[in-house]
Image (cartoon, rainbow, N blue to C red):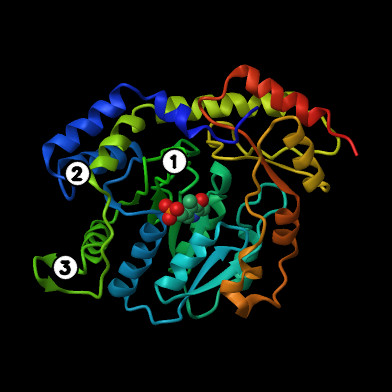
């Protein structure tokens, strides 16, 4: 039996330090807005080669707060547009809607499933304000094409880094490749808390300050409210957990890459298409996705061999009931990816034997 993701084993791999840190915070009697969060913000900003980090409650809030802050800073109107990949996890798109802006969906590249920079110019209107890039599955988007495109048109770039903690683009960390970035520390992410958590990372001091205010009921000074804000905080317990886990993130990502390399070298089934890796150092393999025209049969075959897999994601956002207004739109590449994609187990705590089991099971699939 190979689990898709053994979170219990991941947590155990950080013991006894993790429980000691939790106990220390529990005993301190200080649970919000304290030195654990301040320390993590400093460490995570430094890790991302970025000037500022603001801890928030989750990844969806991080992205939403960035857009809400920009609306205040630049007087963007309700309904102004943000371009976003059509094949992302729906949270990227929900953040745009929640900030009162309009998501404009962009097809991905067929090969790497990342936003297709060539298509951006066809989507820009006088109301476009920003591009949200999503480093999906842990691989970085084509920033060399997207950055000049955005800068020439005065568009902001927000990175959705929820699947890409520590990924590199030509030596530079994600989180500092655009104007601001949102991270999630959901337990299953490459850097995961023991519950919810998130962060905004940016080099823009004013943006960091506005996000911090917006996340604190819109208040900078107690009982004085500047914006219609929200309450979105990373708590002290999660920050202490994240500080422990951050110290091993690069090593954990290395192990994921090692497993991915073995999958790519040793999976050789003509029915199964391996993922395109743009650069090995840049990819942190939050997910290892293969494609197969007979995806459901492949998933059943693997389940019969004791291998758990998941589909990221089964229904594209434009086909969700939540966005009924898009139900007649057609995004053939996005739809094909959703129809064919399957995520194999990958994590820093998988054993070599488990990796071998997955490889053999995939290679033994036939119709
Ligand atoms: C997980 C995820 C999010 C949302 O993060 P939460 O912390 O669960 O709110 C956003 N975007 C992408 C691409 C994700 O994978």
108 vs 77: above or below: above
Question: Which image quarter: residue 225?
Answer: bottom left
Q: Dot 3 corresponds to which residue?
A: 219
Whether residue 148 is visible? yes
Residue 284: x and y in percent read 52, 36
Q: Quadrant of the N terminus?
A: top right
Q: Are marks 1 and 3 in contact (CB under 8 Å)?
A: no
- Name the residue rendered at 61%, 18% in the picture: 352
Q: Dot 1 corresponds to which residue?
A: 165
Q: Nearer the viewer, mark 1 or mark 3?
A: 3
Q: Residue furthest right?
A: 367
Specify which label sits upstream in the sequence, 2 or 3.
Answer: 2
Whether residue 155 is visible? no
Q: Nearer the viewer, residue 13 or 278?
A: 13
- Name the residue rendered at 39%, 47% in the picture: 176
Q: Dot 2 corresponds to which residue?
A: 38
Query: Disc 1 beta carbon < 8 A from ligand 1?
Result: no
Specify which label sits upstream in the sequence, 1 or 2.
Answer: 2
Side of 175 relative to 336 (left or right): left
Q: Between marks 1 and 2, how big is the CA–CA gap?
A: 19 Å
Mark 3 element type: strand
């Amino acid at each position: 039996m190979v689990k898709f993701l053994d979170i219990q084993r991941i947590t155990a791999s950080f013991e006894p330090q993790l429980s000691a840190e939790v106990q220390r915070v529990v005993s301190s009697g200080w649970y919000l807005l304290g030195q654990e969060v301040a320390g993590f913000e400093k460490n995570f900003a430094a890790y991302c080669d970025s000037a500022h980090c603001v801890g928030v409650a989750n990844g969806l809030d991080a992205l939403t707060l960035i857009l809400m802050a920009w609306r205040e800073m630049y007087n963007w109107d309700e309904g102004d547009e943000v371009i976003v990949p059509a094949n992302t996890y729906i949270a990227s798109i929900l953040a745009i809607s929640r900030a009162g802006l309009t998501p404009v969906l962009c097809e991905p590249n067929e090969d790497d499933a990342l936003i297709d920079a060539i298509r951006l110019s066809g989507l820009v209107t006088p109301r476009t304000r920003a591009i949200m890039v999503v480093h999906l599955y842990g691989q970085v988007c084509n920033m060399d094409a997207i950055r000049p495109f955005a800068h020439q048109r005065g568009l902001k770039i927000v990175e959705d880094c929820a699947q890409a903690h520590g990924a590199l683009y030509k030596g530079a960390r994600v989180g500092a490749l655009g104007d601001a970035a949102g991270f999630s520390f959901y337990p299953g992410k490459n850097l995961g808390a023991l519950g919810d958590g998130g962060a905004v990372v940016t080099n823009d001091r004013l943006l960091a300050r506005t996000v911090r205010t917006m996340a604190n009921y819109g208040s900078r000074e107690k009982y004085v409210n500047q914006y219609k804000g929200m309450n979105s905080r990373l708590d002290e317990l999660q920050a202490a957990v994240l500080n422990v886990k951050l110290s091993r993130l690069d090593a954990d990502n290395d192990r994921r890459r090692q497993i991915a390399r073995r999958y790519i070298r040793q999976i050789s089934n003509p029915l199964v298409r391996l993922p395109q890796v743009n650069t090995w150092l840049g990819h942190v393999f939050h997910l290892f996705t293969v494609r197969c025209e007979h995806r459901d049969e492949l998933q059943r075959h693997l389940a019969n061999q004791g291998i758990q897999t998941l589909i990221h994601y089964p229904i594209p956002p434009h086909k969700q009931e939540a966005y009924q207004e898009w139900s007649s739109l057609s995004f053939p590449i996005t739809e094909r990816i959703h129809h064919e994609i399957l995520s194999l187990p990958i994590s820093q705590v998988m054993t070599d034997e488990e990796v071998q089991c997955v490889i053999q099971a995939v290679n033994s699939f036939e119709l």
